[in-house]
Image: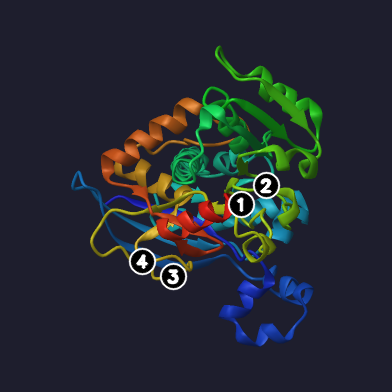
Amino acid sequence: MDRFAFVIHPLTARDVARKYGLMRLLPDRAVEAIISRMSPKYVSTITGIRSKQGVEIEGMLVGCPLTSRQLIEGDPEKVLQRIIETCRLAEARGAQIVGLGAFTSVVGDAGISIARALNIPVTTGNSYTVATALQALMHAAQLMGIDPKQATAGVLGAAGSIGRVCSQYLSTRVRELVLIGLDTDPLEDVARSFGEGACPTTISRDSHAALPECDLVVSVTSAVDTVVEPEDLKRGAVVCDVARPRDISRRVAQERDDVLVIEGGVVRVPGENVDFHFDFGFPPGTAYACMAETMILTMERRFECYSLGRQLSLDKALEIAALAEKHGFELAGFRSFERPISEEQIARIRHNAGR
């Protein structure tokens, strides 16, 4: 049976404390100092995955002992080496391909150097993350009564690998597009990548000024803390938060009952008894799309570096979406701030937006 691996890591020191209870008594920096000396860990075996084509595979979770802050702010060479060590653990345990989860996929050159150091291929899963985020955004827009062709869309973090492809996709499907980021030059480069039929596009370095004009928002920054607050969003807007940790402040859920915030990239994995033997906080049998991309490639026996580097391809995003449908992967409904959100709840948000 073919096998894949997926790298996970604690998002914050509090995640570490959930496993090692005594660490909740220590300051975050002390917890980070302790785990930085730990070796990569084999976390669990993933079982029960079976595609609708009858293909069965097995997976494993391996843990990189660094938090999001450590991965982003730590010494680049040391961080890279810890991720490589984690992937080598997966390789030694029989994985034929490894997926990079959360912040392990964005540090450095987004997986290229990691792949060079291994004997098995690597993927960030970003192509399928893009595909599912856009599917979710468009379906949610329909439920909220928004016609994309009459809407202004904003992409926060548009210069990143995921943001760039989301922008290319939306450029032919909305009335107007706003590319939002910290630096103008990379955003202009994204705008130049659009093909014929692209909508009018503007560029902004000020998310607080740009977002209140947007009916649809995709947020894909690599920020360690939240960057979008309740006052930033337009009444009736649909926001797809692909980032982990999240870009959208929890205050939005508390203070804005007229805005729909959904999480991008959560899918249902095919198989009657899918078990990760690890609690992501998701319903049974569901996973992030980045992990699912690794599964799809394993089912296809395409042991190749599929999504790497800063320049993803819209064609690959559409291709992996088609392969996902072939094998029975599908959007796992909607989730908002780690909780399921029903179409009835969305209807209430739509009603509140029209008050």
- Tell me where residue 193 sits by quadrant: top right
The residue under label 4 is which amino acid type? Answer: Pro
In front: label 3 or label 2: 3
Give 126 or 252, whichever is nearer the viewer. Answer: 252
* Residue depicted at x 39% and y 39%: 303
Disc 1, SS = helix
> Depth check: 204 or 82 in front?
204
Which mark sits nearer the N-terminus, 1 or 4? 1
Residue identified by numbered label 2: 107
Do the numbered discs 3 and 2 sit on residues whose CB atoms are within 8 Å?
no
Q: Earlier in the sequence, mark 3 or mark 2?
A: 2
In terms of sequence position, does the residue under pointer 4 or pointer 2 come before the other?
Answer: 2
- Please identify, in this view, whether the residue under mark 4 or under mark 2 is nearer the observer: 4
**Callout 4: few (<14), some (14-19), or many (20+) C-alpha neighbours within 10 Å?**
some
State yes or no: discs 1 and 2 in contact (Cβ < 8 Å). Answer: yes
Cα distance, mark 4 to mark 2? 30 Å
Of badges 1 and 4, the one in the foreground is 4
> Compared with residue 83, is residue 136 higher up or lower down, i.e. above or below?
above
User: Circle 1 is placed at which residue position?
Assistant: 104
Tags 3 and 1 touching, CB below 8 Å? no
Q: List the residue tagged with mark 3.
A: 278
| Mark whose residue sits in front, 3 or 4 | 4
Q: Which mark is residue 52?
A: none
Q: Position of residue 45 (x, y in %)?
A: 37, 65
- The disc at residue 284 is 4
Amino acid identity at mark 1: Thr
Looking at the image, the residue that sits furthest to the left is: 54
Marks 1 and 4 sit apart, C-alpha to C-alpha, by: 24 Å
Image side of residue 150 versus residue 31, left or right: left
Residue drawn at point x = 20 percent, y = 43 percent: 53
